[in-house]
């Protein structure tokens, strides 16, 4: 009789079965082993066996060609967390020059300090000066990129004044003390998302606290392998959150949400911060999920709406598709609208992957384009997705395809309708 | 050494800064590493000529490491990798290889289980994944023309969408390629009713060493003109030529399928039940069986649950028109009762049968919870003799104390016999080798065969002479020589003694 020995766990060892090839967005474009999880695991194990770390450019390239979408870990029969291995290796091999420049701009950009303000202000002014020379196309403000990155059509319009610096709340009327962790996206670029959430919550008789001094969640740095920076940001954020001691923390960006859950792993060498990070992760909830949970949509659209006729493309961000922050697709949100047709079939990473889109722009666009055949058939009016990275990717990708479609957070879409009717 | 795996979760391994490269001792992973470069044949000049044939030619160490393995998890470093885009390029590559005499190893998705895609003598790996177009689906004659790099699962989806059915469905179908399936003659669970890849290959375009492009077979249901080279090349494991186009036969899609799960108090009852089902003229699409060790790898939330006293399980799937399915279902359930079934359950909907098949496909990888290494043999015995085989396995299990699991396609007698072990434990390894040897001998004594669907490759070449007599083997070598006089194509595979 054979017994399963529960004490021994051989999980985590890649057996090269190849199942990851069936889901890897990068491999499915390039069809090369060095791009898929088992190839990367083979490279890492090889180096481990021979006890040396190659820093050859080809090896670095292979390591950089991962979206960290997590699709491979989700399907892996042996629970190999390639995503975490890649992150660790990125730590030890560092970034190339182009990536360094981008990372340091993100760094400055997300600072609350004076240098951050100056940076944002100046990029906004520069955008306006240079951007004006370019005609507006397809209804979306086309800003000519100031960076050296060629082929790009979309550059986000940066608000010199962040959302949190404008936001004030007067009275604390709600029973729940809710903190809004805006993330850089809603704070500096997609202000409409932040406004939508605050307004919707106001209507639900809930007030939000959105501290101005909150910082970047740290994911861009973590993904690039800069753990030091990511740890620093996590600690500062934890301090800020603890000062407020909220009952609930809401995010409107799936990636920020996922990073909040990552803090505890990141801070494992600091037991004090780690335990605080665990508590904070337990307080976290996605804003859309919160609104749905409170049955607010049913309250406000109590009868079926037959007038709004729209085609929606819903993209579920990877950070909501699996992992600790896994959430079901918010189909409930669209149920009051009889004539809103939602396409849910977009089930692969959009190709953004943060730094990935910067270092591998063409590849990233090819990954994005996999959905375009279906997209074009549908006459889509809005793309809805609750992740800053995905939103940016759709804005860029759709422009590359000469399509003019609005891209927004599901709550921003909802708020538009609420404004229209109430 | 094992403790290193057991005490930490993978996350802990990898998240510790910089610790990745020190934690696991190197002996654990090393299988067999041949990093020797045969620079004499694949020198700079040859590489640049390869580049002029296909721009996608890779030679960096990183790329070579990534094409050193397949699903056997053994490692042999190739010297270069090339990705041809068309038949003409494949022809030029083989012409050059014949001229310069370097080994050429054709490769699809690298998901084979006997080492068919491993560059055991170095040389050039020819990756066919870029030739991945479905060229034509003839809806009137139910024939499809495809390139070898088409992923089997995507082909399934495409033909199903058109109302057709391509039955071969190896466990790896979500990522394996049709070219690889043909080269290895892949099988799958539906072989009992629908046969294997071989039964669906009507014709092939093949480039043989020297660069000649041959066309074999027909596009019709019948055809007896000349020798049947199609059947010869199907399952030849890339030793005779590189497949560049495949003509496949399709079937109309069966209207309905019904999945049944049946549990038995002993393997014996289950095995006897299988023989009886077929003897009575009921041919289900699939009869899969699992022994108690494999059942332990099924998820607890399997639809209908798993009875605690179950020692064997059958998954039976019937397809056809509804009335016929209902009658057959009743007959099968009746028979199962006669063979002491503990529980019999019809899947209530598509989601349930999906969950059952997911659980079945997950067994093979899930076996790693028993031990870090796996020896997997896919022997076939005549269906009626499965009970004898099961007894033999029990006997060996008692005698050696090794962890042995049997599961597989009971309907066609194809059994996945698996030993889980730690290969670093020399004593266990030796015992396992002896067990495999006696399993093979016993299989042949029952009138069975050594491999049903995985092929010989390098994993089983040492045992080939057990099954094939010297005269036949000599003829096979002569055939190989006729196709490949210089022995450049996938050297070291199938034939015993060639690998040294």
Image: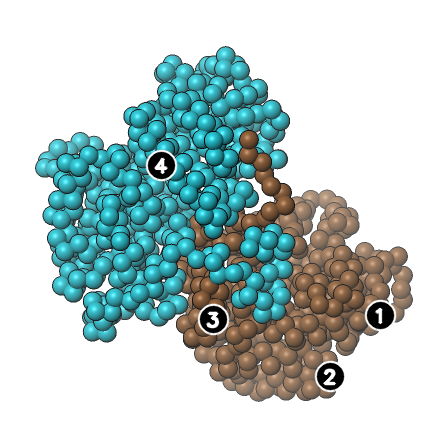
Residue tagged 1: A243
Earlier sequence position, callout 1 versus callout 2: 2
Question: Can the viewer see residue B443 in this picture?
Answer: yes
Dot 4 lies on which element? helix
Q: Disc 4 to disc 1, how far (Cα)? A: 69 Å
Q: In which quarter of the image is residue A217?
A: bottom right
Q: Disc 2 to disc 4, how far (Cα)? A: 72 Å
Pointer 1 indicates a residue of which chain?
A
Q: Disc 3 to disc 1, how far (Cα)? A: 45 Å
Q: Are marks 3 and 4 in contact (CB under 8 Å)?
A: no
Frontmost residue, B304 versus B35: B35
- From the image, state whether disc 4 or disc 1 is nearer to you: 4
Q: Are marks 3 and 1 in contact (CB under 8 Å)?
A: no
Instruction: State which quarter of the image contains the N terminus of chain B.
Output: bottom right
- From the image, state whether disc 3 or disc 1 is nearer to you: 3
- From the image, state whether disc 2 or disc 3 is nearer to you: 3
Pointer 3 indicates a residue of which chain?
A
Q: Colour of chain B?
A: cyan
- From the image, state whether disc 3 or disc 4 is nearer to you: 4
| Numbered badge on residue B437 | 4
Circles 3 and 1 on the same subunit: yes
Circles 1 and 2 on the same subunit: yes
Pointer 4 indicates a residue of which chain?
B
Question: Which x, y percent locates residue B234?
Answer: 24, 41
Above or below, A366 relative to A75 = below
Q: Which chain is brown?
A: A
The residue at the point 43 percent across, 57 percent down is: B30
Circles 2 and 4 on the same subunit: no
Looking at the rendered structure, the number of numbered marks drawn on it comes to 4
Label 4: how many residues lie within 10 Å, few (<14), some (14-19) or many (20+)? some
Frontmost residue, A53 versus A80: A53
């Amino acid at each position: 009789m054979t017994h399963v020995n529960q004490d021994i766990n051989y999980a985590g060892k890649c057996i090269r079965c190849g199942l990851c090839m069936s889901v890897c967005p990068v491999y499915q474009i390039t069809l090369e082993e060095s791009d898929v999880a088992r190839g990367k695991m083979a490279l890492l194990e090889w180096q481990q066996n021979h006890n040396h770390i190659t820093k050859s450019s080809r090896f670095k390239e292979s390591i950089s060609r991962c979206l960290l979408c997590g699709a491979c870990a989700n399907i892996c029969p042996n629970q190999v967390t390639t995503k975490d291995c890649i992150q660790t290796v990125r730590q030890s091999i560092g970034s190339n020059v182009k990536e360094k420049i981008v990372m340091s701009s993100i760094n400055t950009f997300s600072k609350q300090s004076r240098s951050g303000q100056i940076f944002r202000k100046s990029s906004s002014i520069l955008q306006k000066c240079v951007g004006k020379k370019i005609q507006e196309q397809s209804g979306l403000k086309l800003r000519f990129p100031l960076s050296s990155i060629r082929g790009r059509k979309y550059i986000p319009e940066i608000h010199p004044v962040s959302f949190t610096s404008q936001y004030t709340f007067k009275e604390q009327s709600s029973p729940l003390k809710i903190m809004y962790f805006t993330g850089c996206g809603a704070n500096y670029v997609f202000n409409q998302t932040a406004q939508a959430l605050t307004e919707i919550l106001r209507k639900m008789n809930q007030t939000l606290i959105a501290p101005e001094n909150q910082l970047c969640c740290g994911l861009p740095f973590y993904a690039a392998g800069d753990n030091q920076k990511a740890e620093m940001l996590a600690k500062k954020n934890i301090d800020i959150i603890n000062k407020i001691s909220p009952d609930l923390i809401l995010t409107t960006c799936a990636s920020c949400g996922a990073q909040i859950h990552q803090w505890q792993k990141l801070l494992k060498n600091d037991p004090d911060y780690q335990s605080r990070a665990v508590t904070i992760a337990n307080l976290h909830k996605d804003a859309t999920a919160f609104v749905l949970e409170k049955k607010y949509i049913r309250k406000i659209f109590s009868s079926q709406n037959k007038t709004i006729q729209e085609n929606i493309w819903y993209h579920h961000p990877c950070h909501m598709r699996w992992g600790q922050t896994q959430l079901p697709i918010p189909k409930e949100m669209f149920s009051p609208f009889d004539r809103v047709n939602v396409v849910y079939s977009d089930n692969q990473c959009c190709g953004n992957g943060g730094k990935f889109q910067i270092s591998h722009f063409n590849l990233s666009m090819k990954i994005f384009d996999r959905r375009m055949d279906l997209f074009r058939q549908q006459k889509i009016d809005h793309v809805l997705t609750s992740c800053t990275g995905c939103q940016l990717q759709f804005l860029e990708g759709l422009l590359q395809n000469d399509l003019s479609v609005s891209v927004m957070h599901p709550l921003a879409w909802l708020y538009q309708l609420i404004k229209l009717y109430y | 050494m094992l403790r290193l795996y057991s005490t930490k979760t993978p996350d802990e391994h990898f998240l510790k800064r910089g610790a990745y490269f020190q934690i696991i001792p190197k002996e654990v992973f090393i299988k067999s590493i041949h990093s020797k470069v045969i620079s004499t044949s694949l020198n700079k000049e040859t590489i640049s000529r390869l580049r002029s044939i296909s721009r996608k030619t890779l030679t960096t160490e990183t790329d070579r490491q990534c094409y050193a393995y397949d699903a056997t998890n053994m490692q042999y470093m190739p010297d270069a990798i090339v990705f041809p885009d068309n038949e003409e390029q494949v022809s030029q590559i083989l012409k050059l290889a014949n001229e310069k005499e370097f080994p050429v190893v054709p490769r699809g998705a690298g998901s084979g289980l006997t080492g068919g895609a491993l560059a055991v003598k170095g040389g050039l790996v020819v990756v066919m994944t870029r030739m991945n177009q479905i060229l034509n689906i003839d809806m009137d004659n139910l024939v499809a023309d495809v390139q070898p790099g088409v992923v089997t699962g995507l082909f399934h989806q495409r033909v199903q969408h058109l109302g057709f059915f391509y039955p071969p469905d190896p466990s790896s179908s979500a990522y394996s390629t049709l070219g690889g399936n043909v080269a290895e003659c892949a099988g799958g669970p539906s072989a009992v009713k629908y046969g294997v890849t071989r039964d669906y290959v009507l014709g092939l375009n093949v480039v043989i060493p020297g660069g000649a492009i041959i066309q074999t077979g027909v596009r019709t249901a019948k055809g007896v003109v000349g020798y049947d080279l199609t059947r010869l090349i199907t399952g030849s494991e890339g030793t005779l030529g590189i497949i560049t186009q495949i003509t496949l036969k399709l079937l109309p899609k069966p209207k309905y399928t019904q999945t049944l799960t049946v549990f038995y108090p002993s393997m014996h009852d289950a095995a006897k039940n299988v023989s009886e089902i077929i003897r009575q003229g009921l041919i289900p699409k699939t009869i899969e069986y699992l022994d108690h060790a494999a059942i332990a790898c099924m998820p607890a939330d399997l639809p209908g649950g798993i009875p605690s006293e179950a020692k064997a399980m059958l998954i039976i799937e019937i397809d056809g028109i509804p009335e016929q399915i209902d009658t057959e279902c009743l007959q099968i359930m009746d028979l199962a009762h006669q063979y002491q079934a503990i529980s019999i359950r019809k899947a209530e909907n598509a989601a349930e049968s999906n969950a059952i098949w997911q659980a079945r496909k997950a067994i093979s990888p899930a076996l790693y919870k028993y031990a870090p290494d796996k020896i997997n043999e896919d022997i076939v015995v005549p269906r009626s003799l499965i009970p004898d085989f099961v007894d033999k396995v029990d006997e060996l299990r008692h005698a050696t104390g090794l962890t042995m699991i049997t599961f597989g396609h009971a309907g066609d007698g194809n059994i996945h016999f698996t030993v889980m072990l730690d290969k670093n434990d020399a004593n266990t390894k030796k015992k396992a080798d002896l067990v495999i040897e006696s399993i093979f001998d016993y299989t042949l004594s029952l009138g069975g065969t050594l491999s049903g669907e995985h092929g010989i490759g390098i994993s089983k070449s040492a045992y080939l002479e057990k099954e094939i007599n010297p005269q036949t083997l000599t003829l096979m070598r002569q055939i190989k020589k006729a196709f490949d006089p210089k022995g450049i194509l996938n050297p070291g595979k199938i034939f015993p003694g060639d690998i040294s």
